[in-house]
Amino acid sequence: MRRFTLIAVPYFWLLVLFLVPFIIVFKISLSDTALAIPPYTPTLDLNSGWEGIKGFFADLDWENFTFLTTDDLYWKAYLSSLQIAAISTLFTLLIGYPIAYAMAQSADEWRPTLMMLIILPFWTSFLIRVYSWMGILSNEGFLNQFLMWTGLISEPLVILNTNTAVYIGIVYTYLPFMILPIYAALEKLDASLLEAAEDLGCSRLTAFWLVTIPLSKQGIIAGCFLVFIPALGEFVIPSLLGGSKTLMIGKVLWEEFFSNRDWPVASAVAVILLLILIIPIVLFQRNEQKQREAEGQ
Amino acid sequence: MAETAFAPWNDESATPLIQFKNVTKRYGDFVAIDNLTQDIYAEEFFALLGPSGCGKTTMMRMLGGFETVTEGQILIAGQDMNNVPPNKRAVNMMFQSYALFPHLTISENIAFGLKREGKPKPEIDARVDEMLRLTRLEKFAKRKPHQISGGQRQRVALARSLAKAPKLLLLDEPLGALDKKLRQDTQFELMDIQEKTGTTFVIVTHDQEEAMTVASRVAVMDEGQIIQVATPADIYERPNSVYVADFIGDVNIINGHATRAGDGYDVTYAEGTAPLHAKTSNDLGNSAKCALAIRPEKVSITAQKPSKAANTVKGKIIDIAYLGNLSTYHVELANGQMMKAQAANTRRLERRAFTWEDSVWLSWTDTAAIVLEA
C-alpha cells in the first residue's frame, strides 16, 4: 500500500499537469474555430445528456491536421526549427566542451567558483538576458560600436533580426545545460586512465581522443538533448532576436494562438511539435538508462 | 644446488638496466627524493618499500615518465630519460587503481598498447590471446572491467602492461586492493610471470611481507632516501640501521653502551645486570652508544635459567599474543625494558607452559643479536 502511494504521487502529478492539459489541447486541435469564448466549437454540454455527448464527438474531426499539410508554412517551420536547433546544439557543444574540460582540469579550490559562474546567469530573468542581447547585437549596439572603434569594420554588421542572432541567443541561453552534464562526466574521469593511455603509447592528443571523449560520451549526449529539445520549440529567442525571415515553429504557434486567434490550428501545431519532441526525449531517456546500467557495477 | 644464485648486483662486470644518478625531486620546498643514486639490473624484481610519503611512488613515477627529475639523471639501458615522455619509453606501468579503460572490453584493454604501435591485426590478436592465457583470463575476454572481480581486474592490468613486452614493468602497489588470501596467491603468480617473461619488475609497496616474498632485492626508503638495499634475507637478518630493523618484521631494540670484547661487543643496557654479548663485524669503535636488535623468534623463553646460553635475562610475562601456530610473549625485564619472545605452539593451548605473571628467563645466542649504531 505504501509502495502504491509512493508511485501514485508522481503519476498523479503527471496526470494532472501533463496528461490532462494534453488531452485538452488535443481536443481543441480536433475542434473548429468560432467567434466565441472560448474561440472554438464544439464545447461539451453535459446538460443535454447522452445526445449532447454524441453530438460533441461527432463534431470533432482531423481537418486542422489536414490543413497543416496543405500550407507549406508549417512543415517549413518544423524543418527550419529542426535545423536551427541542430546547428545551435552543435555550436553549444563546440563551445561548451572546452569550457567543461577546462573546469574539470582546474584546481579543486576553483571548481565551485567556476560552477557558480556557469549557474549565475540563471539568477537573472531569461527574458531580460535575451533583451540585453538586443542591446549588444543591434546596429548601434555595443558589439558594432566596439568593432567600429577598433577599426575592424567601417559599416555596422547586421546581426540582430537574422538567424545569426537566433543562434547566438540559443547558444548563450543553453550553454550551461551543455556544460554541466559534460563537466559531471569529465570530473568523474580518473586521471590515471590518461596516464595509462600515455604509458601504453598514446600522445596527449590520442589519449584525449581515445579515452576522454569516449568516457564523456554520456555527458555529451545528455547535454545535446538538453539543448536540442528546448531549442526546437523555442519561441522567445526567435521572436526577440530573429527577423521576419526566421521561421521557427514556436513562433508560428504563438502567432496562431494570439494573432490569428485560431486555437484549433495552433493546438494541432502543438500536438505535432510534441510528437516530434517525443523521439529525442525517448532517446534521451534511453541514454540515461544505459548510463545508469553502466554505472551500476 | 649447482645453480648459481641470481645476483648481478655483486657482479662487477654487469651493467645495470636502470641507473639513478644523484636524482633529486623537489615539489616547491618539499624534497621528495634526496640525491638518490641506485642501480637496478635486468631481470631483477626490485621492491621499493617504505611508509607512505617516503618517496617510493615518486621514484617509480619518475621511471615511468610521469614526474620530471629536478636534478640528476635517470638512465634506462644507458639512455638518459630526462626528456622522454611516457609514451616514448620502453617502460610500462601497472597502476594502483589498475586504470582499466571502462569503455573497452578486457581484450580491447590488453590490445590498447599494441594498437598504438600499429602492428597488424593478426599479430595483435595473437599477442592478446597469449596474454589472456598467461593471466588465465580467456573466459573474460569479452567482458567490461566492471563485470569482473577485483582479482581479475588486477590480472587484466598486469596483462595490459605486459602486452607490449616492456623492458621494465613498474608495479604501483599492485596488490593493495586484494584481500589477504588472494594477495598471497597473486604474489606467487607475479613471481611466476616475472620469471617466465624475463621482464625487469620494479614494485612499490608498503607491505613488507609482500616485498620480502616477491623481490630479489628490497630497497627500504625513508624521507626520500634509500636506507638499505639488500636481498630479503639480508634485510631481515642484517639490517644496517634501527630504522630498517624496526620497519621489517618484529624486533626487540635494546639501547645500551657498547664496549669491544673479543670478536664483538659487550653491551651494557642497565645497571647491575651482566652485559649482553653479540658477535659482529660492524665497527662502532671501542666504546659507543648502540642499539641491539634481536628478532623475537630468536629469543627462547624458559622457566629455568639456561646454563649454556650466551645471553640470559630475567623477566615477567605481561602479555601473551596467541597467533595460532605461534605465541608472542611480552616480557618485562627488571629495568622496565619490554621484550618480545616468540615460541611455536607445539603443545595444545591448555597445556601451555607459561601464563601471565610468570617469572621466566629469556635467552639468545651471541650471533642472534645485531649491534647497530643508536
Image: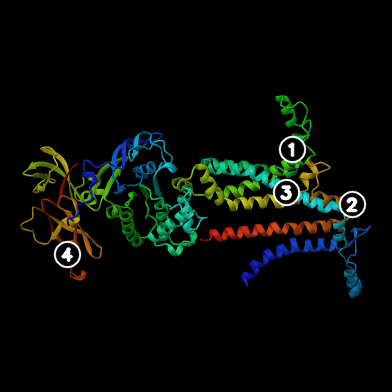
The answer to whether residue B358 is left or right of residue A58 is: left
C-alpha distance separating marks 1 and 3: 19 Å
Select label 1 or label 4 by which is in front.
Answer: 1
Relative to B116, residue B107 above or below: below
The answer to whether residue B251 is left or right of residue A148 is: left
Residue occupying image coordinates x 30% and y 49%:
B43
Name the kind of residue labelled 4 in the image: Phe
Numbered label attached to residue A133 = 1
Numbered label attached to residue A85 = 3
Q: Quadrant of residue A16?
A: bottom right
Q: Earlier in the sequence, mark 1 or mark 3?
A: 3
Q: Quadrant of residue B28?
A: top left
Q: Which residue is mark 4?
A: B354
Residue occupying image coordinates x 59% and y 60%:
A290
Asked whether disc 1 touches disc 3, contact meaning CB atoms under 8 Å apart, the reply is: no
Chain letter of disc 4 in the image? B
Q: Which residue is mark 2?
A: A260
Select label 3 or label 4 by which is in front.
Answer: 3
Q: Residue furthest right?
A: A35
Location of the N terminus of chain B by quadrant is bottom left
